Amino acid sequence: MLKKIIPPVAKIIPKELEKFGEVRIDNYFWLKDRENPEVIDYLKKENAYYKKMTAHTKQFQKELFEEMKGRIKEDDESVPYFYNGYYYITRFEKGKNYPIYSRKKESLSAKEEILFDCNKLAKGHSYFQLGGLSISPDNKLVSFSIDTVGRRIYTIQVKNLVTGKLLSDKIEKVTGSAVWANDNKTIFYSSQDETTLRSDKIFKHKLWTSQADDVLVYFEKDETFNVEIAKSKSRKYLAIESESTLTTEYRILEADNPDGKFRIFQKRIRGLEYSINHYGDSFYIMTNKDNATNFKLMKTLETTTSKENWTEIIPHREDVLIEDIEIFKDFLVVEERFNGLHQIRIMPWSGEGEYYLPFESETYTAYTTTNVDFDTDILRYAYQSMTTPSSVIDFNMKTKTKEIKKEQQVLGGNFDKNNYIEERIWATAKDGTNVSISMVYRKGLKKDSNNPLLQYAYGSYGHSMDATFSSTRLSLLDRGFVFAIAHIRGGEDLGRHWYENGKLMKKKNTFTDFIDCSRFLIDQKYTSPEHLYAEGGSAGGLLMGAIVNLAPELYNGIIAQVPFVDVITTMLDDTIPLTTGEYDEWGNPNVKKYYNYMASYSPYDNVKKQNYPNLYVSTGLHDSQVQYWEPAKWVAKLRNMKTDNSILFLDTNMDAGHGGASGRFEAIKELAKEFSFLLDLEKIEK
């Protein structure tokens, strides 16, 4: 007789949490203490339980991993781009987990110069991330940063590209991004508060000096703002951006004058958002000024930058969202979104012959990529759809001809895009709003309710979830799965109003939109509750937590990656990374109306005695964005409260942060775990 595997049970230590005279009892608050050996022991017991319960799928996971890895061109490289006399290339070598960064002087036939081989740098580390690469204007030095924990706390160093040696400079416990002044010896970088990890300071560092001697250039006192520093495409200006969810403020300084004083571009006004691009004697400003909800484009001279001097270039439109711009000598390129779809608009400065790039599909993604030069007629952009692998394209804006520089290869020999169908359908939400769903599945699918379907969404921060291609996803599609992206409110898929109607006191629209999309897919017989699965990560994990409380009967299984589920407790704790900067997204629970609204949907607080779907929950011990204890507490409470025998797994990566494992193949191993969870529930064994 097989011995039953008993899941771990977290001990209950009630803690009273009082606010506005109301008391919440948190039985698992103790899991917040990562220094407590009992906490680590509990996480390890959950991991052991997961491994025992999935031992029968271990071989299948390996096969899935090899299958997905087998579609990837291992000896791959990026399309080179030319900048300041060099072609820059990122490439991978067969069998290796990490990229190699290199460059070639003047010509692609020149000798390759290795900047960094991350495979060598990652040796001895269970987690490795290289970031913040920045080449000095004279091409002789490169600043870079390394994180070996996964908590987004970096150390910046500088490498001499002539000698290959590291300089003595070491700048520790910072965000990792840095920019050079034009003197080749001054670096500006951002650092964060050690407790909250809010990026709040900009420092100036002179080469060959100690970090202790660095000069504090700017300190952002407002705890709802983050700061970063960048260099303009024109290379003339350094710009400090202070940004919150609703408000922006820039400070600028000529890059030739690193010891000068930054001046305010336009002082912050709550609700005024803007971004700046420099060209010639002017700045071009994308802004929501004067209630331009979907943004408009304005212009001002670099000598008179306050808003009363801004003049309109592209007016605000109710049905078109301006997402970004690229400036060239003869052309202005505008990235727009209309009816949920990307558009790339080419506007000659002459004012004659404006046009849009033609895109035929309704489930595609197109965006500009690396365009570092002004004086060129070539626009580089990327295109992909749910059936079409990604391509990088050089488009001549004068002749309107294009050259495909690279097309993503899908190895394995049997991929044919014509074997798959992509479509966009529209569900009706309970308030009458139409919500689009992008879908892909194998040709010949029958709408008989028997198809397994994985529904994915995010729905927060105005982040649009675009329809993209995935070679790993083929492992589900080829086994009969439908994959669907629900473009729910909270993203910006249909413009800024789509975001505004899915945040703060309208956050529940995000959850009900997803559920209404699920019901529509069931009604249209694409699937049924016995075969419907849902997936979301981070704020999308909040979405997963909400839907299983609200409509558990609709789903057979849920994948919740690093889920933000303990909304009230987290948002009341301003020592936790990201909290204060998120008040404009979720609301400040120190204000009663927001507290009450959060309390009505917070997944952890709303777990109740009912049946729940099968759940696979993943987290990282070092996650700085959604702390590990949120999913740990949620799983513990679900184990105690749920009234069914469905599967409930907590899988904690003890070596990683918010993004999961580092290295391209380690990430696929995590995906194989998720896919095997779904396929095992569907009793698909190969």
Image (cartoon, grey):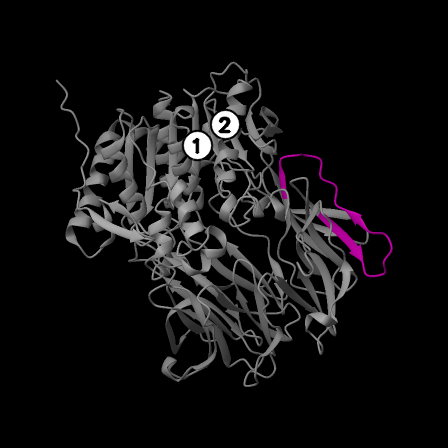
Q: Mark 1: few, some, or many residues within 10 Å (few <14, many ≥20)?
A: many
Please tell me which residue is depicted at 55% across the width and 45% down the height of the picture. 491
* Picture disc at residue 534: 1
Give me the residue at 59% from left, 53% from top: 79
Quadrant placement of the C terminus: top left
Q: Which quadrant of the figure has residue 350?
A: bottom right
The stretch drawn in magenta includes residue 77: no
Specify whether residue 624 is in view.
no
Q: Amino acid at mark 2?
A: Ser
Look at the picture and state if 342 lies above or below 261. Answer: above
Please determine whether, in this image, residue 145 is positioned above or below residue 78.
below
Q: Which mark is residue 518?
A: 2
The segment highlighted magenta reads 344-365
Q: CA–CA distance between discs 2 and 1?
A: 9 Å
Tag 1's secondary structure? strand
- Residue at the (45%, 22%) spot, across then down: 452
Residue 462, position as x, y percentages in the image: 55, 49
Give the residue type at disc 1. Answer: Ala
Image x and y of residue 156, in percent: 41, 70
Q: Quadrant of residue 535?
A: top left
For discs 2 and 1, the disc positioned in front in the rendered view: 2
In this orientation, which residue lies closer to the viewer: 209 or 114? 209
Q: Residues at badges 2 and 1 in contact (C-beta under 8 Å)?
A: yes
